[in-house]
Image: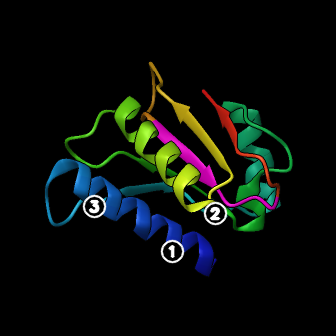
C-alpha cells in the first residue's frame, strides 16, 4: 500500500505540473476491494477476476479538474514508463458513468496498457 500511495502522490504532482498549478486533487473512485465485493462488481459492471484491487495494488481515479481523460491517461502512462513502478494502466472513457484511469503496481515486469 505504501508503494501504491507513493505512485498516487507522484501522479498527482505530475498532473499539477502539467496544469501549471500547485495542487491537483485527484478523486479516488475505487481502491481495495474484498473478494466478495469484487465478485459482486463483476456481475454489475464487468471487469476481471483476480483484480489487483483485491490485493490492494490498484486504484481507479478520475482526472483532476482541467485534464481530460485522454490527457490524464497520457500522464499516467508517462509516469509508468519513467518511474517503473506502475505496471498496469487502463483508460476508461465511458459514455455512461465517470471516465477514469485504473493504475496498478502488479508484480509483472512488462507494462500492461488497455482501453
Mark 3 or mark 2: name the one nearer the start of the chain. 3
Q: Quadrant of residue 36?
A: bottom right
Are the residues flagged by discs 1 and 2 in contact, CB closer than 8 Å? yes
Residue 91 x %, y %: 53, 34
User: Which mark, residue 44?
Assistant: none
- Location of residue 54 (image quadrant): bottom right
Q: Which mark is residue 85?
A: 2
Q: Which residue is mark 1?
A: 6
Comparing labels 3 and 2, the label whose residue is closer to the camera: 2
The residue positioned farthest toward the front in the image shown:
82
Say if the magenta span includes residue 103. Answer: yes
| Mark 2: secondary structure | loop
Query: Residue tagged by mark 3?
Result: 25
Quadrant, the C terminus: top right
Please indicate whether residue 111 sits to the left or right of residue 6 in the image. right
Query: Which label sits in the foreground, 1 or 2?
Result: 2
> Where is residue 37 drawn, in percent x and y?
73, 55
Helix, strand or loop status at disc 1: helix
Contact (Cβ within 8 Å) of mark 3 with mark 2: no
Amino acid at each position: 500500500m505504501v508503494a501504491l500511495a507513493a505512485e498516487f502522490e507522484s501522479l498527482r504532482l505530475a498532473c499539477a505540473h502539467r496544469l501549471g498549478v500547485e495542487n491537483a486533487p485527484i478523486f479516488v473512485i475505487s481502491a481495495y476491494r474484498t473478494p466478495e465485493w469484487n465478485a459482486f462488481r463483476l456481475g454489475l459492471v464487468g471487469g476481471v477476476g483476480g483484480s489487483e484491487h483485491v490485493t490492494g495494488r490498484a486504484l481507479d481515479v478520475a482526472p483532476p479538474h482541467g485534464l481530460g481523460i485522454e490527457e490524464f491517461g497520457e500522464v499516467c502512462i508517462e509516469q509508468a514508463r519513467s518511474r517503473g513502478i506502475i505496471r498496469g494502466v487502463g483508460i476508461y472513457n465511458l459514455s455512461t458513468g465517470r471516465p477514469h484511469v485504473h493504475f496498478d503496481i502488479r508484480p509483472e515486469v512488462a507494462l500492461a496498457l488497455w482501453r
